[in-house]
Amino acid sequence: MANNEDAFKKVVSHAKEYGFIFPSSEIYDGLGAVYDYGQLGTELKNNIKSYWWKSMVQYHENIVGIDSAIFMHPKIWKASGHVDAFNDPLIDNKDSKKRYRADVLIEDHIAKIEEKIEKEVEKARKRFGDAFDRDQFVHTNARVLEHQAKIDDITRRYSQCMNDNDLAGLRQLILDLEIVCPISGTRNWTEVRQFNLMFATQMGSVSEGSDTIYLRPETAQGIFVNFLNVQKSGRMKIPFGIAQIGKAFRNEIVARQFIFRMREFEQMEMQFFVRPGEELKWFEYWKAERLKWHLALGIPAENYRYHDHEKLAHYANAATDIEFRFPFGFKELEGIHSRTDFDLSRHSEFSGKKLQYFDSELGENYTPYVIETSIGVDRTFLAVFSHALKDETLEDGTTRTLLSLPPVLAPYKAAILPLVKKDGLPEKARAIFDSLKHDFMLQYDEKDAIGRRYRRQDAIGTPFCITVDNDTLDNDTVTVRERDTMQQERVAIDQLDSYLHRRIKPITID
Ligand code: ATP
């Protein structure tokens, strides 16, 4: 693709044109940072959720899944710390009147310096060829070291401000770094203020005396408050996990990156309960395991990186992000946090119910420690979708738009295409459709020339096209065309089911 911005625009327009993602309430000019999933987007999203659910719940005998309500007792958000501390520092540019997250402005500034380092690395790689040693280069090259020293200095000041909740310090850092508003180009900044991200609403009619409740900003708390229910009813033994997929809501200050940052989104979270003292071992385990999950999708490893946290949230004693190379740069896709016994202890304190576990092997009661893995469905969608979308030039000089999704995630697994709309081919094709539809999501298409139909399927990521032609009527075989290689082979109709099962393998880890 021409450049990152064009690539990102293409992602957004392709998603809309083919029925993956629409702006919410579009006929009313949309609603900020809220999106609807269309007919194909819903399939892809469901497949992502199913891949996660299977790899967490089905493949682990000690992880179970729940579905807790979005509305929860308001005290939960007091106990969790969200009422007091779920804030983002915001800053406005007085000239453009645009609002920014102060922390994001600083992180973007750091990312720009990192890009400079990468440019030096790329230049050197070209110069030295096979003999290039990246590690040695970044530790010895004067220019790189200078950039790195700047990053270290900014990171130190930034972490200090965030840890001390020093809003004036954050503003000063923005001024010292001479960060300008991308719209007005000026450094005319307001003070930094804290902004709580939770949406509040009212439960019960006002005359009854209504209560302020919050739309949950994360699914995790629904797991913590059900810890005892699940542990006891499922006779779960530590270490064990509880997984959940569900909607979360955050009144994000800056929401300009399509489905990367939404106000209503979906999370896939798993809380893993362990013995106190063993949490860092399990943190390392899940950190490695979650990266394997991403790599199993077949996206090359260079698109992922860990980002260990300098500033730890109030509940964590270790935290890392798995970042993905989105069209707008490396950004967080998933968080892995060692949450200590913070949540269970706080809920014990606020509810007055003891949330403990009796470890029969140790013969003692304790409050379990927790490792959390937390990933956004929508960000995974964006990662997979943006990586899969390409313009390809074919041998004959023509181009095609290709969405090379992993087959297991693709909305349609196969398209059934009668070569022409006569001679009994549509009837034969429909019979094949009916024989496979219980096992596979399929599309039937008889409109336009076959080449155009192939292109349509390429653009929506269908891994296989099954074409019914005149020979099919004679010998009960069809042509199967593979999306990525465009190679075709003849397959007997009664073998199609096993052929597709074999080719659309479930993703396995290890
Ligand atoms: P960020 O720093 O990007 O705001 P976060 O650190 O607040 O993210 P977490 O609270 O760790 O995010 O949430 C876990 C995961 O939920 C994130 O890794 C991301 O995939 C997803 N997520 C969080 N906020 C949003 C959002 N506004 N829109 C879409 N996905 C989100």
Image (cartoon, rainbow, N blue to C red):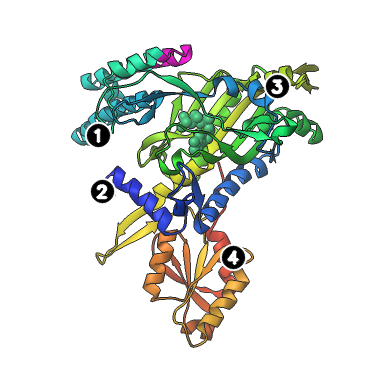
Please tell me whether mark 2 sits on a helix, a strand or a loop.
loop
Chain-order first, disc 4 or disc 2: 2
Please tell me whether mark 4 sits on a helix, a strand or a loop.
helix
Q: CA distance from mark 3 to mark 4?
A: 51 Å
| Residue 60: image tag | none
Chain-order first, disc 1 or disc 4: 1
Residue 291 can be seen in this image: no
For discs 3 and 1, the disc positioned in front in the rendered view: 3
Q: Amino acid at mark 4?
A: Ser
Residue at horizontal 41 percent and vertical 65 percent from the top: 456
Please name whichever residue, 401 or 78, is drawn nearer the observer in this view of the structure: 78
Please name whichever residue, 13 or 135, is drawn nearer the observer in this view of the structure: 13
Please tell me whether mark 1 sits on a helix, a strand or a loop.
helix
Q: Amino acid at mark 3?
A: His
Secondary structure character of the magenta stretch overall: helix
Q: Which residues are magenta?
A: 158-167
Q: CA distance from mark 3 to mark 1?
A: 51 Å
Mark 3 highlights which residue?
347
Q: Is residue 478 magenta?
A: no
Mark 4 highlights which residue?
498
Mark 2 highlights which residue?
2
Chain-order first, disc 3 or disc 1: 1
Q: Amino acid at mark 1?
A: Glu
